[in-house]
């Protein structure tokens, strides 16, 4: 039986209930162009449709002084299941980034596209044109299942084909059924119908909170299973994908000063065959729908449902909802959570090139015409593109005949050389943060590159240029760049101040731990550089940085989420 709610439900539950399956008065509000924003309720509802209202924070205070409204615009997130997207879709995103957005494409940490800076009067047309390219934005955000991630893994293309199909099938199966999306954005006809027709899986209040699914193909953990509510870990026996282990309860977001919020690694609770995967996903979603916390949105992610009730309880519930028992989980091993850059040939003889994209931001600068270069490749490309979970891009499934042409463009646009960056830079992630993110406490995407440049002086002297060190920066502790799984993380604490966390596992298998709190920006490098130097001198053969800092006593290991805040010593910065 579902839990009886004792405290009042969160305000968002009321918004969802009143919305008539995500309609609210969003259509009318969007049509009102006398103002650049939308109402507070619609600001919540529009997320389910794949958009966030934002404002340019760089000019917020200046506009306040001038007694002007905030400079409102909208971010649009486009779902790309498994990150697989066609050259035509790429070209259309590229065009729309100029026609309607700020001239950049953001490749996200969940293999999606984002456009920033779309003004209200262009929002509907942009979303319509995105749908014209056979992509959509519904459920890219909101209290529903989001874009399902999948490892691109070209080396094992038959395994990837299965993993990718499962990711797409789950994505489709868990897409909200409401007619609201078509009515509002695509001028679809209004149909009045029942809950069974509108939302057979979610019901009228959808899920307590956002829900995230990833499909991983070991040994790569590039999708970071421990940051996902639900993960499918491919089990490959004799070269064949026989099914998936099911892991539940991973997640990143926490709030500074609230120790009952924490990142958490997932629990592996069973194994299902390939054919059972979609059904298993639905069962897990339904358990969360019925037992997740709907009172306090800070405690409503699936990770807290698992933490509160225990993994065994959760497994029993899933079996109960399935009506049959999952099998025992099977052995697997992850060896890294980064991307493998450069060329790979798959078993079908097709070629794949993974390109490093700093911060996932595709734009043209005076020195580096990345957007133009990718546009030229898309024009002649006979395969597909795959957005990686680490904000990079794979030019995938290139035919042997086309490979020389792609190679020539990679050279002429100076793209290939980007992959010669240090192992630290290639393993870096920065979330969007300022100026668009409303929750940012400080910089991330615009700042991490220069922090790495300064750290590279130490890496060079220490002979660590090629060593892979996973480093991530976010502008706040919500964890969009999955910082708590990094070997080094800098997490915004306030304006120009960061908490430094150390000791995440290189394969994303272990959370890190707070090392220093509220470190001013100008002291990040001189705090980290001596530890990196120490690592170069005292590491053991093959030892990763995250393991070294624990063995050397800089931090204690975090076993799981509940002890993330424990055993922290000398955290004050001085
Ligand atoms: Fe995120 C909210 C950007 C991946 C945890 N995230 C936001 C918002 C929408 C801010 C807001 O609510 O107003 C950010 C928009 C910034 C902007 O201007 O674009 C934002 N999140 C992103 C992206 C674009 C970061 C990036 O640089 O790539 C990623 C988009 C992924 C996608 O395509 O769907 C992104 N966010 C993540 C991840 C990583 C992941 O899923 O692998 C996490 C941590 C994993 C997890 O969910 O536990 C993440 N985002 C959050 C949270 C904290 C949720 C929580 O459990 O507390 C918030 C805030 C919230 O939901 O209240 C948030
Ligand atoms: Fe914004 Fe914080 Fe997410 Fe960065 S981690 S994008 S600052 S919500």
Image (cartoon, grey):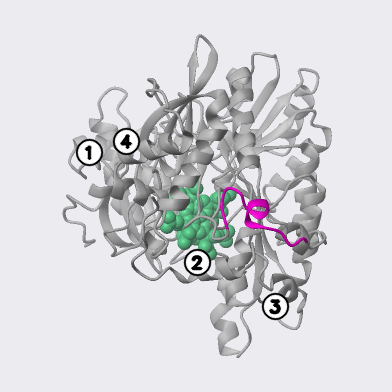
Q: Which residues are magenta?
A: 191-203
Pick the front one: 341 or 156: 156
- Picture coordinates of residue 362, whole percent (x, y): 66, 49
**For the residues marked 3 and 2, what is the alpha-carbon distance in whole angstroms?**
26 Å
Q: Name the quadrant containing residue 198.
A: bottom right
Residue at figure coordinates x 28%, y 22% from the top left: 541
Query: Label 4: how many residues lie within 10 Å, few (<14), some (14-19) or many (20+)?
Result: many
Label 1 element class = helix
Q: Is residue 540 left or right of residue 14?
A: left
Which residue is label 3 attached to?
36
Residue 13 badge: 2
**For the residues marked 1 and 4, what is the alpha-carbon distance in whole angstroms?**
9 Å
The numbered mark, 1 or 4, whose residue comes first in the sequence reads 4
- Picture coordinates of residue 219, whole percent (x, y): 45, 24
Query: Label 2: how many residues lie within 10 Å, few (<14), some (14-19) or many (20+)?
Result: many
Residue at figure coordinates x 56%, y 45% from the top left: 110
Magenta stretch contains residue 199: yes
The numbered mark, 3 or 4, whose residue comes first in the sequence reads 3
Magenta stretch contains residue 532: no
Query: Label 3: how many residues lie within 10 Å, few (<14), some (14-19) or many (20+)?
Result: some
Q: Is mark 2 within 8 Å of ligand 1?
A: no
């Amino acid at each position: 039986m579902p839990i009886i709610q004792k405290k009042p439900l969160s305000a968002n539950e009321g918004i969802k209930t009143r919305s008539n399956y995500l309609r609210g008065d969003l259509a009318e509000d969007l049509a009102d162009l006398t103002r650049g924003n939308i109402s507070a309720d619609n600001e919540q509802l529009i997320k389910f449709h794949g958009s966030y209202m934002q404002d340019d924070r760089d000019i917020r205070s200046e506009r306040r002084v001038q007694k002007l409204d905030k400079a409102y615009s909208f971010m649009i997130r486009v779902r790309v299941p498994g990150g697989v997207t066609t050259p035509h879709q790429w070209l259309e995103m590229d065009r729309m980034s100029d026609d309607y957005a700020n001239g950049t494409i953001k490749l996200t940490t969940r293999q999606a596209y984002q456009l920033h800076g779309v003004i209200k009067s262009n929002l509907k047309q942009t979303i319509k044109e995105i749908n014209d390219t056979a992509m959509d934005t519904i459920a890219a955000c909101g209290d529903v299942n989001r874009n399902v991630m999948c490892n691109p893994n070209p080396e094992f293309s038959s395994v990837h084909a299965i993993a990718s199909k499962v990711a797409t099938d789950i994505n489709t199966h868990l897409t909200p059924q409401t007619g609201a999306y078509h009515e509002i954005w695509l001028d679809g006809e209004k149909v009045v119908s029942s809950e069974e027709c509108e939302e057979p899986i979610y019901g009228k209040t959808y899920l307590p909170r956002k829900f995230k699914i990833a499909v991983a193909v070991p040994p790569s953990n590039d999708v970071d299973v421990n940051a996902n509510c639900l993960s499918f870990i491919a089990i490959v026996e004799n070269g064949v994908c026989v099914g998936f282990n099911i892991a539940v309860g991973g997640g990143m977001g926490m709030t500074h000063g609230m120790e009952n919020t924490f990142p958490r690694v997932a629990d592996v609770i069973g194994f299902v065959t390939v054919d059972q995967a979609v059904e298993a996903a639905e069962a897990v979603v339904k358990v969360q729908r019925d037992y997740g916390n709907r009172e306090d949105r800070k405690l409503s992610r699936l990770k807290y449902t698992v933490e509160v009730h225990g993994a065994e309880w959760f497994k029993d519930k899933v079996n109960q909802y399935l009506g049959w028992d999952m099998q025992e989980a099977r052995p697997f091993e992850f060896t890294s959570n980064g991307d493998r850059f450069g060329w790979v040939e798959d078993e079908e003889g097709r070629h794949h090139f993974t390109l490093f994209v700093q911060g996932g931001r595709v734009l043209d600068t005076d020195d580096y015409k990345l957007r133009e270069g990718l546009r030229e490749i898309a024009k002649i490309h006979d395969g597909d593109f795959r957005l990686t979970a680490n904000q990079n891009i794979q030019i995938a499934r290139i035919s042997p005949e086309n490979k020389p042409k792609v190679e020539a463009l990679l050279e002429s646009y100076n793209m290939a050389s980007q992959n010669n960056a240090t192992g630290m830079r290639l393993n870096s992630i920065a979330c969007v943060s300022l100026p668009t993110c409303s929750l940012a406490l400080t910089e991330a995407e615009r700042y991490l590159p220069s922090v790495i440049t300064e750290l590279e002086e130490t890496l060079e002297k220490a002979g660590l240029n090629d060593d892979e060190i996973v480093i991530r920066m976010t502008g706040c502790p919500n964890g969009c760049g999955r910082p708590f799984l990094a070997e080094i993380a800098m997490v915004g604490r306030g304006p120009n101040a960061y908490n430094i966390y150390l000791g995440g596992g290189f394969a994303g298998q272990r959370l890190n731990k707070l090392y220093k709190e509220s470190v001013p920006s100008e002291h990040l490098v001189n705090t980290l550089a001596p530890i990196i130097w120490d690592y170069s001198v005292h590491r053991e053969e093959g030892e990763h940085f995250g393991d070294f800092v624990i063995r050397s006593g800089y931090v204690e290991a975090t076993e799981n989420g509940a002890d993330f805040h424990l055993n922290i010593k000398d955290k004050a910065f001085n």
